[in-house]
Image (spheres, rainbow, N blue to C red):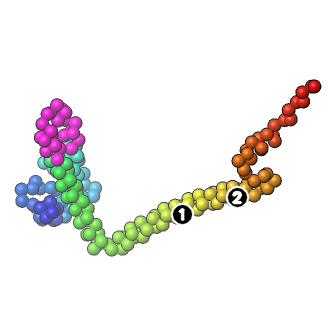
């Protein structure tokens, strides 16, 4: 892991690694400073540019005509694995950069970190409060349904207890009387 993090810290560069930096200076490797637009020339690779390029390479390897028409599955798998591994390496470097900046922020402005934590906790409390309200509304609804069902079961006391012919007796009671046959 130390080899993948080389070059991420100020003044450090991993052996054999292309220098990753921009106009942001040595304290911000790979990212331009605030308000300073980064040049997009061939020699100015930032971590974001590398991440984007490796992501595009992953897709290109999956839809490439060489891979579609290729018959050697092992060669295709190796090429795709290499693209994905490069993407993951650059993603780790980018994550390391942001973790480093987060650490610097926590040392230089600890009150900002506390404010962010408090804000996150408030948002989480609001989300959970909405969830509790939603569940309470469902609970009240189902309690009402249960009360309605139990109330309906108590009302029909004049009906005979259900037996094997109870349905037929109830159905025949609602039919009009049969006409009488003349003798």
Where disc 2 sits, the SS reads helix
User: Splitting the image into 4 quarters, where does residue 96 fall?
Assistant: bottom left
Which residue lies at the image location 92% right of the left edge and 25% below the top edge? 182
Does 51 sit above or below residue 180?
below
Spatial CA distance of label 2 from label 1 is: 27 Å
What is the quadrant of the N terminus in the image? Answer: bottom left
Q: Position of residue 77 (x, y in %)?
A: 16, 43
Element at label 1: helix
Residue at 15% over, 55% down: 20
Where does residue 170 sit, x and y in percent of width and height? 77, 44
Determine the image quadrant of residue 64: top left
Mark 1, Cα crowd under 10 Å, few <14 / some 14-19 / many 20+, is few
Quick check: is 75 in the magenta stretch? yes
The picture places residue 90, in percent across and down from the top left corner, at: 19, 54
State the extent of the magenta-drawn residues as a range: 58-81
Q: Residue at x 19, y 40 (%)?
A: 61
Residue 150, label in figure:
2
Along the polypeptide, which appears first: circle 2 or circle 1? 1
Above/below status of 126 relative to 86: below
Residue of label 1: 132
Magenta-span inclusion, residue 31: no
């Amino acid at each position: 892991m130390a080899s993948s993090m080389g070059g991420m810290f100020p003044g450090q560069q991993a052996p054999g690694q292309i220098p990753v930096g921009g106009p942001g200076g040595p304290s911000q490797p790979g990212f331009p400073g605030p308000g300073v637009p980064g040049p997009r020339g061939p020699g100015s690779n930032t971590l974001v540019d590398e991440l984007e390029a490796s992501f595009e390479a992953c897709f290109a390897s999956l839809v490439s005509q060489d891979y579609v028409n290729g018959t050697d599955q092992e060669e295709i798998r190796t090429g795709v694995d290499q693209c994905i591994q490069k993407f993951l390496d650059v993603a780790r470097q980018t994550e390391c950069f942001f973790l480093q900046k987060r650490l610097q922020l926590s040392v230089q402005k600890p009150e900002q970190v506390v404010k962010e934590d408090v804000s996150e906790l408030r948002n989480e409390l609001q989300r959970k409060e909405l969830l509790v309200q939603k569940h309470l509304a469902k609970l009240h609804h189902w309690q009402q349904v249960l009360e309605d069902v139990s109330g309906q079961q108590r009302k029909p006391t004049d009906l005979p207890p259900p037996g094997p012919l109870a349905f037929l007796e109830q159905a025949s009671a609602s039919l009009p009387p049969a006409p009488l046959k003349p003798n």
